[in-house]
Image (cartoon, helix red, strand yellow):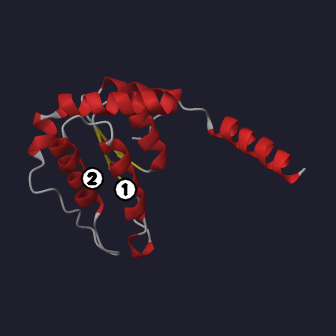
């Protein structure tokens, strides 16, 4: 069942792994710093795959093991690669690596989480952009 946001955050923090859907849940899973898989909402002409690819690329930069980074990228892409009007969700040939290497994946996600939390908020960055733009216009 749906949970109030605070209870959902507690659930994410108390779980060993998180399987999330949608952008809001994705960012909460990233901030929780636990191994996760994101199932993006399907968009026309598989436009959602660009988002998944961007996430996979960003997350990859936090892995020290390049093979594990590539396996995680492959899993995220295959988990989300499906056609319109299809209820099938193809899975990576070997999902077991995710479970068996969740500690290492978790370390990368913790680093990713830290970078997200330490980054300025969108509103702070927007204000800086506007201030710079206004100085440029003068």
Picture quarter containing residue 63?
top left
Coordinates of residue 32 in the picture (x, y in percent):
39, 29
Residue located at (45% from left, 31% from top):
115
Along the line of sight, which residue is nearer the eye, 102 or 104?
Answer: 104
Q: Residue at x 37, y 63 (%)?
A: 49
* SS state under label 2: helix
Q: Position of residue 84 (x, y in %)?
A: 35, 75
- The mark nearer the N terminus, 2 or 1, is 1
Residue bearing mark 1: 52
Q: Which residue is at the front of the view, 2 or 104?
A: 104
Q: Is residue 33 visible?
A: no
Q: Residue at x 9, y 57 (%)?
A: 93
- Residue 15 rendering spot, x and y as whole percentages: 28, 28
Q: Mark 1 and mark 2 in contact (Cβ < 8 Å)?
A: yes
Report if residue 31 is visible in the image. yes
Badge 2 crowding class, 10 Å Cα cut-off, few under 14, some 14 to 19, many 20 or more, is many
Q: How many marks?
A: 2
Left or right of 105 on screen, residue 121: right
The circle on residue 76 is 2
Quadrant of the rendered image containing residue 17: top left
Rounded to the nearest angstrom, the CA distance separating label 2 from label 1 is 7 Å
Q: Secondary structure at mark 1?
A: helix
| Image vertical order of residue 86 relative to residue 102, above or below | below
Q: In the figure, 9 relative to 68: above or below?
A: above
Seen at 42% across and 43% down, the residue is 26
């Amino acid at each position: 069942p749906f949970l109030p946001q605070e209870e959902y955050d507690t659930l994410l923090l108390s779980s060993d792994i998180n399987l999330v859907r949608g952008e809001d849940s994705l960012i909460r899973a990233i901030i929780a710093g636990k191994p996760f898989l994101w199932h993006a909402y399907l968009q026309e002409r598989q436009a959602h795959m660009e988002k998944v690819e961007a996430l996979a690329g960003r997350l990859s930069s936090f892995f020290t093991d390049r093979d594990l980074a590539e396996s995680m990228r492959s899993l995220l892409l295959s988990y989300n690669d499906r056609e319109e009007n299809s209820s099938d969700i193809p899975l990576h040939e070997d999902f077991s690596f995710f479970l068996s290497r969740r500690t290492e994946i978790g370390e990368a996600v913790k680093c990713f989480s830290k970078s997200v939390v330490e980054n300025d908020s969108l509103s702070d960055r927007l204000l800086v952009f506007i201030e710079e733009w206004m100085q440029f216009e003068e």
